Image: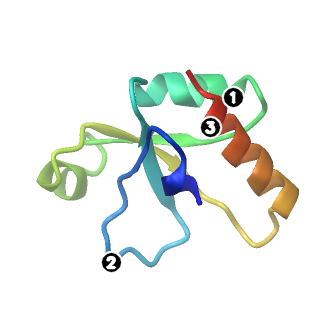
Amino acid sequence: MLYSLPGVTGTCPADASAAIITFNKEGMAAADVKQKLAQQRINVQIASVMHTRLDLSARGIDTTVRVSPHYYNSEDEFDRFLNAVDALT
């Protein structure tokens, strides 16, 4: 669902099977996405090529937003996250 939002590009490898999702929002730096979501009390992290050189560098990605949904997150929390990402400008 996240990757189907307008302007959202998934940055996870196609064969990824972990509970970590990475993405970028068109026209926005990953740091700006993090800051705007934090203002809404939605916590995400940033993965940069400095910390994941073998993975991101090989795919030509400098930074990406990293979110780690888990079994204890409710559907309402997922919806709130998706709506917040969709509304980012």
Task: Give how far apart the Cα atoms at labels 3 and 2 are.
Answer: 25 Å
Query: Which residue type carries mark 1?
Result: Ala
Q: Secondary structure at mark 2?
A: loop
Of 33 and 89, nearer the camera is: 89
Who's the residue at 60% across and 27% down the image?
88
Where 17 sits versus 39, above or below?
below
| Residues packed near mark 1 inside 10 Å, few (<14), some (14 to 19) or many (20 plus) | few
* Structure colour scheme: rainbow
In the picture of the structure, the residue carrying the numbered disc 2 is 15
Task: Give how far apart the Cα atoms at labels 1 and 3 are.
Answer: 15 Å
Where does residue 72 sit, x and y in percent of width and height? 82, 68
Who's the residue at 13% across and 55% down the image?
58
Who's the residue at 63% across and 23% down the image?
36
In the picture of the structure, the residue carrying the numbered disc 3 is 86
In the picture of the structure, the residue carrying the numbered disc 1 is 38
Does residue 36 appear to the left or right of 55 in the view shown? right
Where does residue 30 sit, x and y in percent of width and height? 44, 31
**Residue 7 visible in the shown view:** yes
Who's the residue at 76% across and 73% down the image?
71
Query: Which residue type carries mark 3?
Result: Asp
> Residue 78 occupies which quadrant of the picture?
bottom right
Query: Which residue type carries mark 2?
Result: Asp
Marked residue nearer the N-terminal end (3 or 2): 2
Q: Secondary structure at mark 3?
A: helix
Marked residue nearer the N-terminal end (1 or 3): 1
